């Protein structure tokens, strides 16, 4: 007897998982690597062009100034012109600017290029979060988001060894190793930008690899599940900006992002400062926290989707990260720091999957485009604050301990904000 075929909506979701998630994952690996590779470049670049720890921290965070300014407009444009065209534009321009980082000559050019990189990439991440809501119903979004966002961990896992190897090219053809790293790592974004134009549909209605029945069934299921799980949904941009929950989520995301970039931008320098290891060895060893983060992220997201609970998952993750940073501040050796920062990474990255289900629980349409971008842009101010605070503290004290404790305190507060972020009563599932 032939097995019964899957319902058309399930068949469509299965195709979307196979066709979209690996590709979006690849795009974000490249995006995140181009954002954080400055941490590996700093092992050579700071001395080569005369950047102090504070100047480096300010420049690393400068990315988020322009990123914040242009995030909401970029996501609104994406909703209007479609994901395919706008994501392609973002990738091509950010790849070009990322490669141009090889021309940094001092503080002014470093700040300028980091600012331009943030402007070029603005809208990519919230655009992807919005795009996932076009394809996956609420009951699957934490896992879909986590699978997509494991790219941030994998970019560190892969990027560390790759960046270390490129740094080893120091002196080839008259270029520093850090210049080779920027040049080479910017190219994939440009190439993939053109691939997006051929591969990525704007939504289910444009997916030629779905049958007409599958497209209709998937869109009907998305509408039905959004209606069933949503409560007091906002549809307009103004309503999203007036919603207190949007600003509460932005504050919560701020605390998570501070931890994220505290690890991403400073991990190589923390390890090298304690160990004296070579650039290549630091690049290889720094992959371990990202590996732990990737595993933890998937496990937390799957449990959150299975139970339907979000807030406690986020809170427990941020508190885990806080404990990791406290332990890192007390670590006396590089292996101890590596273990503590791996724990912090599990907590920080684990929070992302359940967190990004929360805005879509009460936002739709233009409100979703603007609200998700607002949460991400305000939250990403933490990407400016975290690296700068650590750099400032390092310059003043010659050590990282006080900065790591500050990160721990912020993440502990984030756990309390997560418990306060009640999305409202939902039919049939806990909040």
Image (cartoon, rainbow, N blue to C red):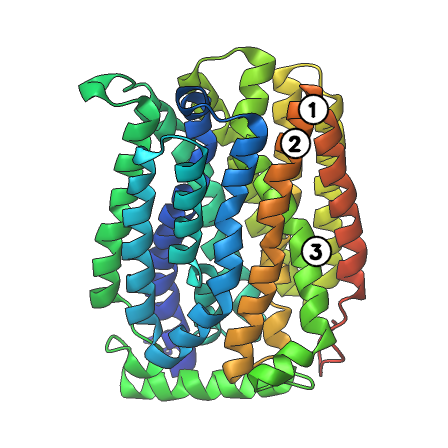
Q: Quadrant of the C terminus?
A: bottom right
**Relative to 298, 355 lies left or right:** right
Q: Which residue is mark 3?
A: 314
Mark 3 vs mark 1, CA separation in Å: 33 Å
Quarter of the view holding residue 422: bottom right
Check if mark 2's residue and mark 3's residue have beta carbons within 8 Å.
no
Q: Which residue is mark 2?
A: 392
Mark 1 vs mark 2, CA separation in Å: 6 Å
**Numbered label attached to residue 34:** none
Report if residue 147 is visible in the image: no
**Relative to 368, 228 lies left or right:** right
Quarter of the view holding residue 197: bottom left
Q: Position of residue 291 (x, y in %)?
A: 51, 36
Check if mark 1's residue and mark 2's residue have beta carbons within 8 Å.
yes
Question: Which residue is depicted at the point 63% across and 76% down?
Answer: 361
**Relative to 248, 84 lies left or right:** left
Question: Which residue is depicted at the point 39% across and 38% down?
Answer: 109
Q: Which residue is mark 1?
A: 396
Q: Earlier in the sequence, mark 2 or mark 3?
A: 3
């Amino acid at each position: 007897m032939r097995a019964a075929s899957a319902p058309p909506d399930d068949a469509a979701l299965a195709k979307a998982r196979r066709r979209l998630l690996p590709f979006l994952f690849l795009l974000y690996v490249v995006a995140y690597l181009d954002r954080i590779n400055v941490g590996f470049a700093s092992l050579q670049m700071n001395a080569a062009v005369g950047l102090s720890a504070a100047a480096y921290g300010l420049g690393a965070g400068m990315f988020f100034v322009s990123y914040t300014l242009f995030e909401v407009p970029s996501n609104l444009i994406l909703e209007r012109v479609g994901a395919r065209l706008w994501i392609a534009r973002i990738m091509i321009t950010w790849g070009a600017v990322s490669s141009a980082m090889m021309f940094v000559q001092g503080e002014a050019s470093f700040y300028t290029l980091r600012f331009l990189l943030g402007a070029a990439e603005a809208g990519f991440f919230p655009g992807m979060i919005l795009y996932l809501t076009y394809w996956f119903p609420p009951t699957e979004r934490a896992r879909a988001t986590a699978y997509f966002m494991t790219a941030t961990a994998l970019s560190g896992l892969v990027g560390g060894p790759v960046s270390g190897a490129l740094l080893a090219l120091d002196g080839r053809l008259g270029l520093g190793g850090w210049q080779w790293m920027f040049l080479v790592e910017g190219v994939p974004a440009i190439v993939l930008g053109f691939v997006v134009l051929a591969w990525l549909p704007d939504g289910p209605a444009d997916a030629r690899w779905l049958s007409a029945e599958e497209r209709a069934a998937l869109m009907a299921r998305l509408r039905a599940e959004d209606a069933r799980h949503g409560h007091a949904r906002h549809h307009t941009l103004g309503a999203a900006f007036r919603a207190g929950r949007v600003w509460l989520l932005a504050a919560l995301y701020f605390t998570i992002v501070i931890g994220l970039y505290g690890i991403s931008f400073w991990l190589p320098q923390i390890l090298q400062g304690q160990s004296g290891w070579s650039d290549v060895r630091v690049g290889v060893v720094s992959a371990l926290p990202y590996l732990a983060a990737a595993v933890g992220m998937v496990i937390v997201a799957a449990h959150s989707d299975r139970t339907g609970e979000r807030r406690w998952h986020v809170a427990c993750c941020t508190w885990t990260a806080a404990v990791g940073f406290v332990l890192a501040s007390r670590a006396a050796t590089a292996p101890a720091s590596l273990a503590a920062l791996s724990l912090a990474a599990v907590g920080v990255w684990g929070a992302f999957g359940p967190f990004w289900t929360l805005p879509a629980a009460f936002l739709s349409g233009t409100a979703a485009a603007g609200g998700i971008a607002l949460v991400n842009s305000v939250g990403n101010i933490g990407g400016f604050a975290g690296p700068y605070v650590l750099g400032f503290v390092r310059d003043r004290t010659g050590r990282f301990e006080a900065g790591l404790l500050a990160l721990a305190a912020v993440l502990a507060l984030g756990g309390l904000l997560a418990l306060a972020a009640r999305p409202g009563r939902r039919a049939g599932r806990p909040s």
